[in-house]
Image (cartoon, grey):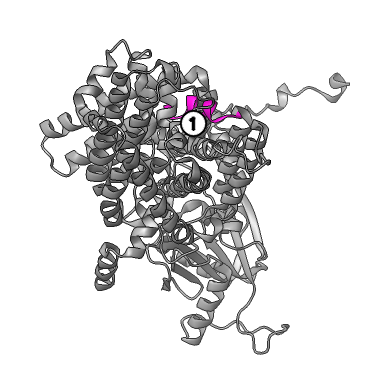
Amino acid sequence: MYRGMEMNAKTRQRVTAAGLLVTLGIVYGDIGTSPLYTMKTIVEDNGGLASVSRDLIFGAISLIFWTIMLLTTIKYVVIALKADNRGEGGIFALYTLVRKRKRWLIVPALIGGAALLADGTLTPAVTVTTAVEGLKGMHFGSIIPISAQSEVVIVTMVVLLALFSIQRFGSEWIGKSFGPAMFVWFSFLGVIGILNIAGNIEILQALNPYYAIHVLFSPDNKVGIFILGSVFLATTGAEALYSDLGHVGRFNIYNTWPFVFLTLTLNYLGQGAWIINNRTATIANLNPFFEIVPAPIRFPAIILATVAAIIASQALISGSFTLVAEAMRLKILPRFKVLYPTQHRGQLYMPSINWIIAAVTLSIVAFFQTSAHMEAAYGLAITVTMLMTTILLYQYLRMQNVKRVFAIGLVGFFGTLETLFFIASLVKFIHGGYVTVIIAGVILLVMFIWHHGKYLRESEDYSVEYASLYAYKDQLNKLAEDNNYDVYAQNLIFLVNVKNNTDIKKEIMYSILDKRPKRADIYWFVSVNVTDYPDTAEYSYEKFGEHVMLININLGFRRNQSINIYLRQIVNDLMKNKIVHKQPQKYTTIPNRQVGDFMFILIHEELSPESELKWFDKWVIQSRFWLERVSSSQKTWYGLDYSDVVDETVPLQLGFRKHIKLRPIEREDNISENEIK
């Protein structure tokens, strides 16, 4: 086993050309499309092309370069990528590594995760809309395919709908398809940038950090520190890069990021050079990115930009799947169906989440209509996520025995920088940022209900009681042989979580022995465990007398969890090896059938009316139960839709209401029947 794990680790570290292409196709779409709108937004915020100065452009380019260098390269590529949980990245994976240090660390994890998921709904909308707007008003002979903004909105929605529809094929297939396109895209960014830099070589001076600091206080900068809100658009893909770690592996990111960073820098420098050379021009619907492209190839460039925008959306979608899957494992989100289209656990597909994101994204396009309005709202939530990641990174550095002074200095630097970006982005709230804040708030509320509801159920007033099968095996075996009770089922199955190898929830024993004695030929207590390997299919068992069996089933993450099928195979194996006795069937369509009927008991909790809770805590618990009902049920999750299933409800009592003790009425106190009449 350990040898297999070692070989798997070596495989992940091996870098291939195909792996690098997949990485380009999956990871860098968001940050790779930032040149489409970052400089455009900076120029618009400062009054348009005629109002900008040389110093403003030098300062803006310098701010962009050093923001990407510090936040994306140093913080995420150099530091954060090392903080992986079994190859998975993202804020929830980071929280998993540090949660044992401080209980309150769940707070930044919840806030950061909710903000990132919310911002992920805006990224597809803004990138695809910006690219499609490049076609608006373009002439092809006497034909203008897209002449109005309403047509831009329709085309954008069609493109996005197609993207969400192909997610079920998996990110590996998408990466292989988009990887070559992204290689062409980044190469295009670099080449076009170089062509424009050649027209004004002095733009290279903008790499000097002096200009970045100077422009913040320069009168040429009409928005002051709030220019950082627009500059931040250049690095919004950094958190998505970290979240996609599990899809491609750390070393593929290490080997592709220098190429991506270089081409982005060249393109921003090229846009800056063009703006300085054309400040006196009058251009309607200015977008410096498209203006630096020579007219003969502008149409192919727009098509390429649209493809890149689709890939940017893909980066956020696949990252969202990873985040939700991590949140499910941490039990801070309800359970949703997960599919694994490939052999790699990090590459997953979640149908419900995919279409929820699709609905929200399409609604954003319909609401904002133009990319300019979307850009005004873009980036606010992601600054919150970055701040929360920084808080968790400090705890991770301390876990790695990094000296406190160095850890505080490093995190203090990034925290200060991100706080400045957050303050600068606050102005976006009234211009549309409130939309992402509302979305993040809804996600955070769901997370809070799920997590706090679990906390209340495990509080001092209520804790789940577990019972050892050893303590009840005699009663169960006697009940199985007690002819005073009718047979409830030949094979009675409970899906259980096992503690200490033999302990299960006491409410299951209550269901068998107290609620209604359920006589069965064999009681099966089945625990299902999902492994980190794709094709695991194994089981172990422990016998507690003639009629009680505990089964542990280990399934690879790609295995279908149709428990009834697996269990029949296990029962046949155990009968063949004479571990359990056969159950010959007199009436059957299957010749020589030796396995009897199966009955699954699924136990659900409902808040007891006897619970004495504060109104808010009661609302949280009831809301959690509602989320359990609307998310993926046990019946569907374990493939029991066509099996014999009994749903039982047990009361959940939190707190205790003081009962009124009834006093018996003495005979002499009784009122006569005549008096009553």
Q: Quadrant of the N terminus?
A: bottom left
Q: What is the magenta segment's predominant secondary structure? A: helix
Please name the residue that numbered disc 1 is placed on.
Answer: 440
> In the drawing, does residue 171 fall left or right of residue 217?
right
Residue at (49, 40) in percent of width and height: 295
Choose between 432 and 141: the one closer to the eye.
141
Q: Which residues are magenta?
A: 369-380
Q: Is residue 632 visible?
A: no
Expressed as whole percent of the image width and height from the top left, the position of residue 450 reads 49, 38
Pick the residue in front: 28 or 548. Answer: 28
Q: Residue at x 43, y 41 (%)?
A: 33
Image quarter of residue 228: top left
- Please name the residue shown 30% across and 65% down the image: 16
Instruction: Report the residue at 68% width, 41% height from top.
Output: 143
As for residue 370 lying within the magenta part, the answer is yes
Relative image position of residue 89 (x, y in whole percent): 34, 48
